[in-house]
Image: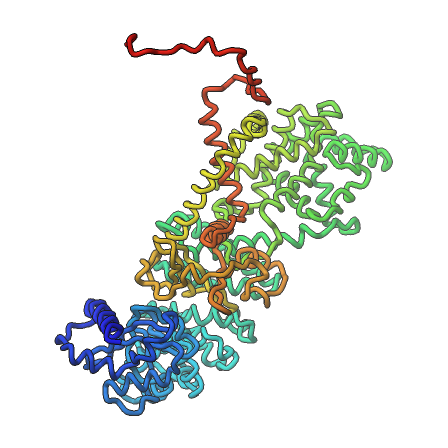
Amino acid sequence: MGHSLEAVLSGVQECRLVVTRLLPAAPPASTSLCRSRLSGSSCTLGAIMEPAKNIVKIAIQMMGAYPQLIELNQSKPLSAVLKDVCDAWNISNSEQYALQYVDGHQAYITELNRMEIKNGSILKLTTSPDKEAGSLCQGVQSHNVDVRSESLKKLAALSRDVTFAQEFISRDGLRILSRTVEEEEDRGEVMCHTLRAISELMEHGFVSWEAFTTIFIQKVVTFVNVNLMLVEITQLALIILESVVQSNTKLVDLVWQEVPLERLLVLLQLPSQETQIKVMALLVALLQKVGRRERSEMLENLWKKAMRQFIYKNIIHGWPQLGDEMRHYLYVLQCLSLGLLEGRMRMAMDPNDAEQRQQLQNLRLTAFPNEVEEGGHLTSERRRSICAKEFRKLGFTNNGSPWQDLCLTPPGLLALDNMMYFSTRWPSAYSRFVLENSSREDKHVCPFARSSIHLTLILCEILRVGEAASETGQDFLTLFYAQDYFLHELFCVCIQVLNKTWKEMRATQEDFDKVMHVVKEQISRTLGHAPTSLEFFRTKISSLNYSEILRRRQEEKLIQDEALSPPVMELRKQLQPELLGLVKQHRLHYLCEGTKFRKISSRRRQDKLWFCRLSPNYKVLHYGDLEDNIDNPPIEMLLQKISVSDMKCVLTGKDCPHMKERSSGKQNRDLVDRAFSICYDVDSCLNFIAPSSTDFCMWLDGLNALLGREMPSERTRIDLDLLLNTELKLRLLDLENISIPDQPPPIPPRPKNHDYCYEFTSTEA
């Protein structure tokens, strides 16, 4: 028994060494004092006999008192633990106190989150959430400006904690704060703390924004519409308005009507990056929530006011590095803009529509103006015959009824829009395309109309026109913001490339699908280089001619053929375990580097980042909320952790707990594809939504590697193939232009005698 007590005292001394480095210096305590602390704490013999899993060594501090070093028994009720701690400091009424983290967001310890306490955690004894909430409710209503300001400042900090938020809201705290906003004339720190507290309290989702009055919303709108000394108030007002818009309440229309687009554009041009992010968040939220007609009007006004040029010049090329949040908003804005084309893409041509018929005639008249002038005195039948012939030269399949070609949806009328834009924007190139093909043999003609319809369909597929924006997507095209009328201009370049490729391939009508496949490959490969301007795209795709496509295909085929020969397959099989180990090491190193993840909510996306990384010894996963202005926090700042030995399995997609209630709509499909969960202990899960498909593959592979299982992602196959092909090329370098037989050479028969052996003697040395 004495040996066990000495071991406990040794552990207490180790904890004290940790605490003395983190806490203010205090007078040294004697051994007798330490033993008396031990007898008054939860480190009893019963606790010593508890399983190690239920015991955590922690430090508890209080202002003006020596810190307590205890072994917390997690199976003991929290109220009993608090009573023991208060008794050690001779404090009565332990029910009025609570434990709180010293670091991070200083969350209160409750029965729900106490299992997150880890060895070495430092807590402090403070007033309970209900008592603190009651005190702050009185403080924020004080007539003393200093008392009210300090109370609001403390309230804004504590409102992040869910336990405190529940207590404060239950005391009608939100009504008190909203009345403060409505009646307060000062626009200084008091208003700043009030808005921050409201924003943090509403993030917990206990109350709907419908509980607030229109007077409150209008007052917040004024903070956006006028110039203020404190830019933080404007930023908080933008955050609140975005949350209101995301809430899908009747207040959305009020925000849309009261906040002018011109004012948001003015704020977007401020040099503050934080303000620009908040403005983009509100703009995107408004665009997502309004109807299609209002969205079209908003985007048209924004583009007219040179918003695209400002984003391209001052944000994409002006910021040293675009953060994840801004990249997401640029991606969503691109999806919403291209989504406006979906209506035309899915609308077939109506032969009874006079405007659409006139557009078809304009295409013909632009290409063949002379024939029209010469046919002025022809009969109607002769004129119809000439029109049919000219529509056939334009490449329409149904030359008698060309509108039938545009009944295919998609691309529907969007193909007609592209052809009209090309004929008016580049009339000389359009006429040259048509006339050049008119002079060829019929079988070698590149049909303009048919090619345009299929090219439009290809562009819609590559650009994902009509697909809903992902909640985590960030893959926007810089080229989209570099050019007005993006899709039409891209079509003008690609249709000329198509004609050029047709000539290089010496294609006939039977080769049409083959040509379109090559053109699609040219466009995809060029966009893969992330062109920053239309001129860069034009130069890059022009260099990627048919000969270059053939060369790359031959290289890929040669690599594939070499890799499929029996000797190479056998060598490949021998190399695979070693290279698979390299892939595994890469995945584990990726987990050690860590990744930022987002907490997806239905309200808004700001300030919802958390970080997770693997310890260097591959034994513990550390995670925690991401502090402001910290992109890559060290392990010491991540207070929560999961032991790899406690991990049971990894779930993905719909099997994840946080994805089971998601609808199957297009907007959630991408989210589900990037979701995974780590199951540990009995019923505990840590839920993730990867920021990209690459991060999803990396984490899925790394976690399965930690569990000793196969790495299942497609990225593993791609990386392994790349390593194997590279290693095979290096090993077969000396055998270039030498054919490798499919079968090994035959083994010669055994010799009849061994007379060829020579016995070496020492005398010959």
* Residue under the image location 35 percent in, 49 percent down: 320
Whole-percent x and y of residue 335? 55, 54
* Residue under the image location 35 percent in, 85 percent down: 80
Say whether residue 17 is left or right of residue 508.
left
| Figure label count | 0
Q: Is residue 370 above or below residue 688?
A: above
In depth, the one of 338 and 633 nearer the eye is 633
Whole-percent x and y of residue 555? 54, 27
In depth, the one of 89 and 436 nearer the eye is 89
Confirm whether residue 662 shows in the render: yes
Q: Which colour scheme is used?
A: rainbow
In the rendered view of the protein, which quadrant contains the C terminus?
top left
Whole-percent x and y of residue 673? 56, 55
Q: Residue furthest bottom?
A: 93
In depth, the one of 698 and 367 nearer the eye is 698
In depth, the one of 556 and 165 nearer the eye is 556
Q: Is residue 700 above or below residue 3?
A: above
Q: For residue 377, what is the image quadrant?
A: top right
Whole-percent x and y of residue 105? 34, 71
Confirm whether residue 336 shows in the render: no
* Residue under the image location 43 percent in, 69 percent down: 239
In the rendered view of the protein, which quadrant contains the N terminus?
bottom left
